[in-house]
Amino acid sequence: MNSPENPTEAHEVLDVVVRLFRAVEESDAAGYFDRTYHRDIVIHEAPSLPYGGVYQGLGGAAEHALAFMGTWAPHRGPGEESMDAVIDAVPDHAYVRWTLRVAGRCFPFLSHYRFRDGLIVESRMYPFDVSDLVGWWVQLDAAADSTAGR
């Protein structure tokens, strides 16, 4: 376990977060778990999001990835893969400002990652405007339903 005497250094934090964001942008499931998450990972998402809630452990991280990608991937077009992440890394923590691009819209987020043993042990995502994001998703989902003849 990290202690004040043995923190995960800022450059190590940066490497892990860059690797994680690259995997998300490239929809690379193997990369998503390549030396990123601690076995005790806890991921927090706003409860009102389609993939909202708390995900625990590596199995929970996999559920989160599937839910996030399942929600947005069907609506993302070419050129919307980049999240334009700006990462501020300090020992044991990273703060990331990033953008979700979907169906021609941009939604800014702030994420906080806490580290233990060189891996992410806690993740919290904060969309700047949850109601706008959820409203847009409802419109997209309804349009997809009507297009699919549901």
Image (cartoon, rainbow, N blue to C red):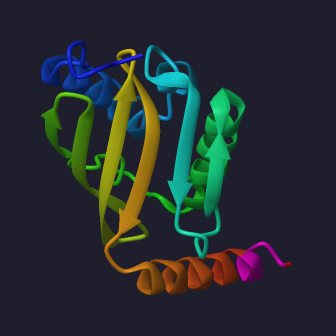
Residue 98, relative to residue 149: is it above or below? above
Q: Quadrant of the C terminus?
A: bottom right
Q: Is 71 situated left or right of 83 in this image?
A: right
Comparing 48 with 75, the one in front is: 48
Q: Is 93 situated left or right of 100 in this image?
A: left
Q: Residue at x 47, y 58 (%)?
A: 76
Comparing 97 with 81, the one in front is: 97
Q: What secondary structure do most residues of the magenta stretch adopt?
A: helix
Q: Residue at x 53, y 60 (%)?
A: 45
Task: Tell me where residue 73 appears, x and y as whole percent.
Answer: 55, 53
Write down the region rendered in magenta: 145-149
Q: Is residue 128 visible?
A: yes
Q: Is 88 situated left or right of 26 in this image?
A: left
Comparing 64 with 137, the one in front is: 64
Q: Quadrant of residue 105?
A: bottom left
Residue 101, relative to residue 64: is it above or below? below
Q: Residue at x 72, y 77 (%)?
A: 147
Task: Tell me where residue 52 appears, x and y as whole percent.
Answer: 61, 63
Task: Tell me where residue 37 appears, x and y as whole percent.
Answer: 49, 25
Q: Is residue 70 visible?
A: no
Q: Residue at x 58, y 49 (%)?
A: 69
